[in-house]
Amino acid sequence: MIEFPSLVGSREVLQNAFDFAQNRVKAIVARDPGFYPMYTEGGRWRHGKEAWTNWCDGFLPGMMWIFAKRCGGEWAARAESYTTPLEHRKMDRGVHDLGFIFLSTYHRWYALTGRPELNEVVIQAGRTLALRFREKGRYMPSFMGPESLFIDIMANVGIVFHAAMETGDAQLMDVAMQHCLTTRRVLIRGDGSSSHEGIYDLRTGEFLRQSTQQGYRSDSCWSRGLAWAIYGFTSAYKRTRDARFLHTAELCADYYIENAPADGVPLMDFDFPPEVSQRKESSAAAIVAAALLRLAKLCADTTKGAFYDRTARRILLTLARPPYLASATDGWEGILKEGIYHLDKGLGVGESVMWGEYFFVEALDRALD
Ligand code: GLY
């Protein structure tokens, strides 16, 4: 259960972490121009280990767009030069991650400038993601195959909602709604925990079982998956005002808050037995902090909203200092330590991960507003 020390003086801590993040991103650009890192190895971004799947290129420019909005200066030009090479991905049918790639980049660029051609790129990416939809089962499958539904896709479906709302396309809206409702039914459990993956019978569309790729096991709760659920259902509610999504976001948030350790940073899997692993996962905490700051403003119950806001700030205060903030580790190139990409594959274990950096910066930006 998360504990709540005083938040006095926290604004300065969060501002220092935000400034530290800017310096780390500047250093990536200076050290390795044009490179889109994914996770560190021994604290270094460039290492040549495998990517598993291609989903992270929006996060580095995404941070630059946040810096551009808050601080101006050179950031917009830098962000643009890292964003335009991604445009071709708007037609990429090989991944389920077009929300990660385009909501962090073209969508932020459009929000800053209002240029309609930028919105067209976001809309096309939303249309492309929606092409994954399967009538049998009523979901958009993961990159693993047509039988596989991932909780992660909840953090991407917002781009389909965006495309539907910007164009008035009712079919796109139906795809986004059905995907969220299916995910809610088969991947969210009664206690608010989540399953990473669901497996379908392709012939009949029958849901067969819960499964996992990155969690401990099929009936456990992978902490980043839960973070994607909180983030995704909160965003779905913000866009649709459908009370079912608010209820699900709160249910998952309450599970996180009740089961996370005192400092607010969860183990990589909520069901890890001590003899298997006690590794923490800082990127899940960063995603949850960003989501809770948004959920806090959407809650009908203002007391609950204030509690989510305080919890988010509590999590951020933990992340904004060592041992999570890398400020005290010589030679470490990332912002946040103790993230995990894929434990079983040995990728990015106890490292900085680019989505952890991005959602940390997003959460800091929201907290500092
Ligand atoms: N594949 C998305 C994640 O690792 O969270």
Image: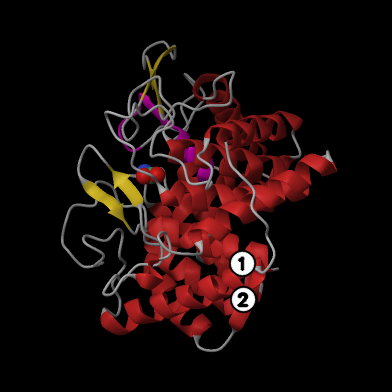
Residue type, mark 2 in image: Lys
Secondary structure of residue under mark 1: helix
Residue 86's disc number: none
- Residue at 47% across, 34% down: 151
CB-based contact (under 8 Å), mark 1 and mark 2: yes
- Of the numbered discs 1 and 2, the one sitting upstream in the chain is 2
Q: Residues within 10 Å of mark 2 (few under 14, many from 20)?
A: some
x, y (%) of residue 181?
60, 26
- Residue at 49% across, 69% down: 63
Residue type, mark 1 in image: Asp
| Residue at which label 1 appears | 365
Q: Quadrant of ligand 1?
A: top left
Q: Looking at this view, is 312 or 328 the one in front? A: 328
Q: Which residues are drawn in magenta?
A: 143-156
Residue farthest along the front direction in this orientation: 5
Residue farthest along the bottom direction in this orientation: 73
Residue 324 found in image quarter: bottom left
Q: Is residue 215 above or below residue 341?
A: above
Q: Looking at this view, is 82 or 163 the one in front? A: 82
